[in-house]
Amino acid sequence: MSKMHQIMLKIGPAAFRIVSAWRRPLDQLTDLYKAYPAPTGETVDFTVRLEPEKPWRRFVRPSVHIGGDFWLPDAAPLPLEQGLLGAEMGMNLQMALGWRRHLLLHASSVEKDGKALVMTGQSGSGKSTLSAMLAERGWRFMGDEFALLSLDSGEIIPFPRLISLKNKAIEAMQDIASEERFGPEMKATPKGDIRHLVPPRDAIARMNKPARPALLLFPRFGHAPELRDMGQAEIFVRLTQASTNYVALGEAGFRSLTRFVDEVPVKAMDYQSIDQAEELIDGLWSELR
Amino acid sequence: MMRDARTLVRALREPSSVEALNNGQWTELISVARAESLIGSLAHRVKDVTVPDRVRAVLQDAVEAHDLARQQALWEADCARRALADYPGKILLMKGTAYVAANLEAGIGRSIGDLDIMVARKDMPVVEAALLDAGWEWVKPDPYDDQYYREHMHELPPLIHRERDRMIDVHHTILPLTARPTPDVKAILDAAVALDDGLYVMAPADMLIHSIAHLFADGDLSGGLRNLWDINLLIRYCSGADPEFWIKLGTRAEIHGLVSELERAVRLAERLYATPVCKSRAGKRRFSDCLYVRRLLARDGYGRETRKITRFAFYVRSHWLRMPPVMLARHLWTKWRKGGKSSDWTRHR
Amino acid sequence: MTQKYRAAEKDELIWHDLDSMTLLYHRPSGITHMLADPAPAILEVMGGVPLSAIEIAERLAAGFDLESNIDTENIVLARLEELSGLGLVSRVPT
């Protein structure tokens, strides 16, 4: 069998082994995650595998099949230039299918004053970009893909992976963040143009500091600024849809999510710019007890 | 770097052997175990052994995930029971669901996929109708596959429940009708053991024969280590509970035409998992046992399938066993013309 | 109808009220149900005993303020059949 390369990564509570037939994606990951503690010589929670789609696609029009301990059939392969994206998607897949130590919400989260703001919604809601931008405006970044909800304490646990910026958000963040924090440009991926952004230093340094969730937002980009209340039934249903492991966690998942819905104030937020969003959020934040 | 799955086999056979593993080897062992659907069983085997902290968390996750699978499997069986409340015949649970419903050690930590049940062939239409009425639907509306399934396979085409999103496979025998050994289904139904809730499981000897049939005569040995582990646990449990078990097992194997398969399963279980066996049931050692072992262990420390040539040989053989050559040619030709990928029935584990 | 039904045991159910609906976690199945009135009330008044639709309707009338012109028995029967399909209630063989 052909030779494989491997590296290890640790982000928040989860550790990964990334195995790849090609060195390049691993070199890119190593560079972008250089400020994170390296778990060399330790054990991991998951292995991600980047392999040629077919043996001859290792060298000829190299095509990356994303696999690992947990996998999906019929996963679409990526060209090698997007191997870094493949590794990040592979880690998402392991978490989504295999993580049980917290309730997983498809949400971004940022922290201020020891309290967490959680933002959830479908693709295009802007939750990822909002978290990246708020992280440059005095908030601590906790994660853009998954919010981890502790089953015991109800706290949000940081899981700050590389921030995945899409399309227009790339340019917007390039104006704010220094170039060395960015990964390679990847055009025309299945999710559009993508560039990864390394989270700010303090996000990495305080990766082990949880925060109590104080506000849940359902952001919606591209509409006149407005805040709306939501019914609990709708909130609960949308959160179960946003959770990959609610069912797998059984009773603990039920108790954890019902407590979250009981205790955390919720608003739907429409906005057209980061300034508008920040103003609405600051208003809500100052009213919190 | 582990070149094959023997570390996993040893860990299952002698749990204390894992104390010698370093962290890198643990990471590999976990990948191998997950790839072979044996992580739940591994977790149970090493529960009293010292392992690194993160490994303990990973194994605990596996235990909990399998507990959930068990709960869901039992519920699904109960839903089928209620849907078939008016059906007077026996409904036999099979495979993983049967092991957990009967509280067997073979059910502990076992991953369970779809619900498999067996009913008398003549009752398939009425059972099918009752399931459709209770919310199950066909998965694939392809007329060729449908015809093939009904005429030649040992089950209805796959059904999925529209709300619970869980699949049920309804069998009327334990091997495809086109396969060469033809088991005595009436004997299986007659000997079936009733559970408290009115569902049935096979008698111990038949349960073991079914697992053996599945390992050798119905697949290309992928998932073979897991299947053989089931066989190991079933043999230990059944022979411990009944001093006449080996005699009954031999008799049943003859009735079902699976004597050489039984012998090979016994040899492989003893060789890999140190299963205590009755020598007279092991038959003579064959050279091909080595090829089987090679195929069963074909997994590396990254979790990849290895040994492509051996694997391919077994794949071709498994098709050969299921269908006579003329039918095989026609089936594969039709599949190729439709541009289909590997057919659905190879997914069954 | 004289068909009797029995609700799931109390210790198999975990209830949680939301503003407009009621959540019910069913332990044996691991399924979370979201129920609208009167289904939660029906399950509550059934206690642990087998009851027919009309008996349940009477218990509901005794415990709750119901509108007088609704056909409680048929509404209860329809809900019981749905709950039976979900496995929260079982039909008791006569």
Image (spheres, rainbow, N blue to C red):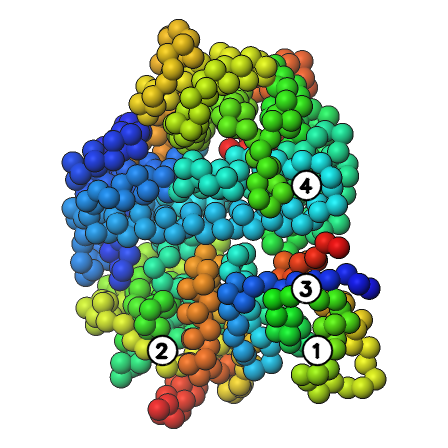
Name the front one of labels 2 and 1: 1
Q: Are marks 4 and 1 in contact (CB under 8 Å)?
A: no
Chain holding disc 1? C
- Give the image location of residue B1, x and y in percent: 23, 32
Per the image, the residue denoted by label 2 is A213
Q: Between residue B65 and residue B253, name the one nearer to us.
A: B253
Chain holding disc 4? B
On whether disc 2 and disc 4 are found on a single subunit, the reply is no
- The answer to whether C13 appears left or right of C62 in the picture is left
Per the image, the residue denoted by label 3 is C50
The answer to which of marks 1 and 3 sits earlier in the sequence is 3
Q: Is residue B102 above or below residue A199?
A: above
Q: Are marks 3 and 2 in contact (CB under 8 Å)?
A: no
Q: Are marks 2 and 1 in contact (CB under 8 Å)?
A: no
Question: Quadrant location of residue A118?
Answer: bottom left
Name which residue lies at 40% across and 60% down: A194
Q: CA distance from mark 3 to mark 4?
A: 40 Å
Q: Between residue A172 and residue A218, name the one nearer to us.
A: A218
Q: Which mark is residue C59?
A: 1
The answer to whether one can see residue A245 in this image is: no
Q: Which mark is residue B140?
A: 4
Chain holding disc 2? A
Which amino acid, by three-letter code, is at mark 3?
Pro
Q: CA distance from mark 1 to mark 3?
A: 13 Å
- Give the image location of residue C11, x and y in percent: 50, 65
Which amino acid, by three-letter code, is at mark 2?
Pro
On whether disc 2 and disc 1 are found on a single subunit, the reply is no
Which amino acid, by three-letter code, is at mark 4?
Lys
- Give the image location of residue A32, x and y in percent: 25, 57
Which amino acid, by three-letter code, is at mark 1?
Arg
Callout 2: few (<14), some (14-19), or many (20+) C-alpha neighbours within 10 Å?
many
Name the front one of labels 4 and 1: 1
